[in-house]
Image: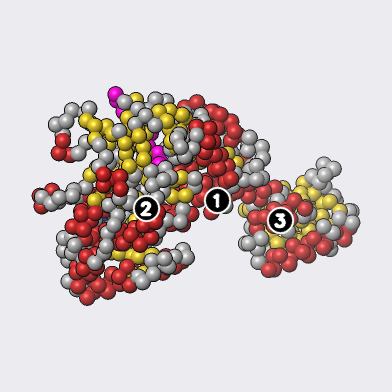
Amino acid sequence: IRIAEASETEKNTLRSPICAILGHVDTGKTKILDRIRKSKVQEGEAGGITQQIGASFFPVEELRRKTKSIPAAQRLQLSVPGLLVIDTPGHESFANLRSRGSSLCDIAILVVDIMHGLQQQTLESLHLLRVRNSPFIVALNKIDRMYGWEPHQDAPLRDTMKKQEKHVRDEYDARVQKTITEFAEQGINAIEYHKNKDFRKYVSLVGTSAVTGEGIPDLLMLLVQLAQRFMTERLTTRDRLECSVLEVKMIEGLGTTIDVILVNGVLHEGDEIVVCGLNGPIVTNIRALLTPKPMHEIRVKTDYIHHKVIYASQGVKIAAPDLVDAIAGSSLYVVGDEIDREAAIDLAKKEVSDLNRYIDKSGYGVFVQASTLGSLEALLSYLEQVEIPVSGIGVGPVHRKNVMAASTMLEHKKEYAVILAFDVRVGQDAARFAEECGVRIFTADIIYHLFDMFKKYVEDIEAEKKKEAMQSMVHPCKIKVIPEYIFNRCDPIIVGVEVLDGVLHVGTPLVIPTRKNLDVGRIQSIELNRKTVPTAKKGDQVSVKIVNRGSGTTSEIGKDFTAEDVIYSHLTKKSLEVMRTYLSDEMSEDEIRFVVEVRKAIGL
Ligand code: GDP
């Protein structure tokens, strides 16, 4: 076992700012990360990047080296020791870097594909950045995809821009402008970074290519600049411990471990810690504080270096007993001078119960299940934004008991008898039970896919409801018997009629207002030019068969009424309700006026 000691500089300097990368799928987040991580070993320069748990550390010398091609960067005073970049891009890892609802991520890179502009997950990322109040910069990636682009490896943006042909520069300008407009639609002021005079008001945009490395120096410079400007104060406070669980992992020989980002403060081997667990807070002691061994020490037998003490900011693996049920996205608390054990347990409990504020007061809503506290929170705040009420929440796999809870919605609102499961397993038993009782489980690992599935489901239910309602609805209609075409006077009445207004449907009950709302009977069939049809419209002359009214027989033409009488469809209150709910958008003014006429005539 190799044991590393913390150096004096580690203890004394500012902590490093933490940076996460977010954006829509396939915009190049991973590629950008790879590109900035790619250390040019062959140049033999000092200060390489170190691989940590869940993050890569860029020492300030490395940042200097990578940005030296930009004059503005040379003037930068750098007091931060470096930059800690989270290795797993995407808003889930950003979401898990949380503590008591606020972000532990100091700065973020939002990657936008310059060829596509803002996309669905860009909006989700923006929402999250805004909720967490995180400063960020925007990488407009894939500039090399623009037609006619001449690549210049690793060049600063302005240098390569100058060397492009005019039509390429014009296209770039146009795309930047378009993106700025799209950001404005989201209520965000964006501007090209070299024009940005006020980082608090404007978000900086920088064109990049993860493939050629163009614009990457600018991106790094911006990150450091942003960190330096706003965070010096934030980065100096060492007193308060801030530590967040990024992942829970089973490691052979170590058991269940947690990968954490120590954002602020110090961790010691042996510390008593508290984290959230699936079944309540977990209290345990740190058995080992581990970081990966450096690349050049591959001959060392163990995979990890053990530490007695770790100073922020760093990504560390913690081995400790009883971590099996630990929840990613949970804060880690150290029992000590700052808080005692009881207080730590309370804080851990509160972290989960705080999310109950997303539960709808009405008691009606969908059920939400997510893999981590961070993603649960992200999903909940998204659902709040799109106004989907939530009635139950949970972390971890979907179990039978979750389905049971969701099934209570079946009798109230069928569309809420749904579990939106984000990045979690659904137990077989749970799936079977859901199938049996009619609870729908939607699983996805992209928030908007869940949203789309749910939306589609609600629409389908609505369409089904509409279909059912329309089938039983009485449509407004007015007809008159044509005296020459009376074939049978009653039981059934078979006559020719003209549709004076509205649409005549099979099934329509008929009534004569001028004869004290005489119940004539119900349309059984309609024939137009000897062909059976389901409906007849205004002006049509059709022959109809009218059968049983309420009493089982029809009225008799010539006895109870005559061909002179205007006959109406017998509108019902329920039908009016259906019209109001489903048809009001489709109905013309004339149709609406006609409904009023029928209502008046039959006294509804
Ligand atoms: P992520 O899903 O956002 O992490 O996207 P990836 O980094 O996996 O990239 C998605 C695809 O786009 C891959 O095929 C990359 O090679 C490609 N890609 C990423 N960045 C660039 C770029 O700057 N230029 C070009 N031409 N392709 C890129």
The answer to whether 199 appears left or right of 556 in the picture is left
Quadrant location, the N terminus = top left
Q: Which residue is mark 3?
A: 475
Region in magenta = 242-253
Q: Amino acid at mark 1?
A: Glu
Instruction: State the CA–CA distance, disc 2 to disc 3.
Output: 70 Å
Q: x%, y% of residue 422?
A: 45, 41
Q: Which residue is mark 2?
A: 235
- In this view, 158 is above or below 135: below
Quadrant location, the C terminus = bottom right
Q: For the point 66% across and 45% down, which residue is it?
A: 362
* Mark 2 nearby-residue class (10 Å; few <14, some 14–19, many ≥20): many
Q: x%, y% of residue 308?
A: 30, 33
Which quadrant of the structure image shows residue 209? bottom left
Q: Amino acid at mark 3?
A: His
Residue 187 appears in the rendering:
yes
Q: Amino acid at mark 2?
A: Leu
Q: Which residue is mark 1?
A: 384
| Mark 1: secondary structure | helix
Instruction: State the CA–CA distance, disc 2 to disc 1.
Output: 32 Å
* Labelled disc at residue 154: none
